[in-house]
Amino acid sequence: MKSRRKRMKAFVAAAAGLLLAGLGAGYRMASGSPAGLPFCKLVQSLNLPQDKRAVVQEYCQSLEAAHPAAAPQKGVKVPPPAAGGPQGGPVYGIVGGGGLTPPPWAQSVYVFTSTWLGRDRLVYAGALARDESVGVVVVATRFSTPIPERIAEYTLKGHGALTLVGANDAMLSLVASDGTHITFDVNTGTLATH
């Protein structure tokens, strides 16, 4: 039994090491956040020697500093994950923590913080990957194609990443990383600061 546990720990450590090594090259996860961030906690929880733990901790801190839009925003309350529909049907509402897996066309362009799942539309909120001071709302199709297709992009300069915090039908409430409150009307494409 002990040898099986040791093999499992070795496997997890090796897998995490390979992931961190590959992720250090700058790949991004589907959530739009730097790919190494989700694995930092995993690797830090392993019983590593002190010298290796220090290297991992330094790497994780550098990722968080380089991508502030991907790190959790202090003081911004993200709603709980959307509940599943009846009988395992479609999910509706807001999904935080990076949102849904973005489609391939979005992965290198945006850093998403949250996603709203509507009847026939998806709304991704976050920032532009090349300039995280520019908040972005991207509207895409839902259910009409296997991969969501971008319908429109709306930007808000100088306020930082946007995070979905509430929804009333198709009127969405967002907060920018600088604390600015924003509404977005999915039906009209109106983005307004308050």
Image (cartoon, helix red, strand yellow):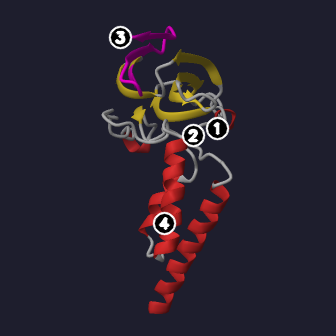
Instruction: Answer with the quarter of the image where residue 145 lies.
Output: top right
The residue that label 4 is drawn on is: 54
Is 27 drawn above or below residue 16 in the view shown? above
Residue 70, horizontal then vertical, whole percent: 49, 40
Q: Residue at 48% of width from left, 66% of height from top?
A: 54
Q: Residue at 59% of width from left, 25% of height from top?
A: 141
Label 3 or label 1, whichever comes before in sequence order: 1
The quadrant the C terminus occupies is top left
Determine whether the residue tagged by mark 3 lies in a helix, strand or loop: loop
Amino acid type, callout 3: His
The residue that label 3 is drawn on is: 194
Determine whether the residue tagged by mark 4 lies in a helix, strand or loop: helix
Determine whether the residue tagged by mark 1 lies in a helix, strand or loop: loop
Label 4 or label 3, whichever comes before in sequence order: 4
Amino acid type, callout 1: Gln
Identify the magenta region: 173-193
Alpha carbon distance from label 1 to label 2: 6 Å
Alpha carbon distance from label 3 to label 1: 29 Å
Q: Nearer the viewer, residue 145 or 24?
A: 24
Q: Are marks 1 and 2 in contact (CB under 8 Å)?
A: yes
Mark 3 or 1: in front is 3
Is 64 drawn above or below residue 172 in the view shown? below
Alpha carbon distance from label 3 to label 2: 27 Å
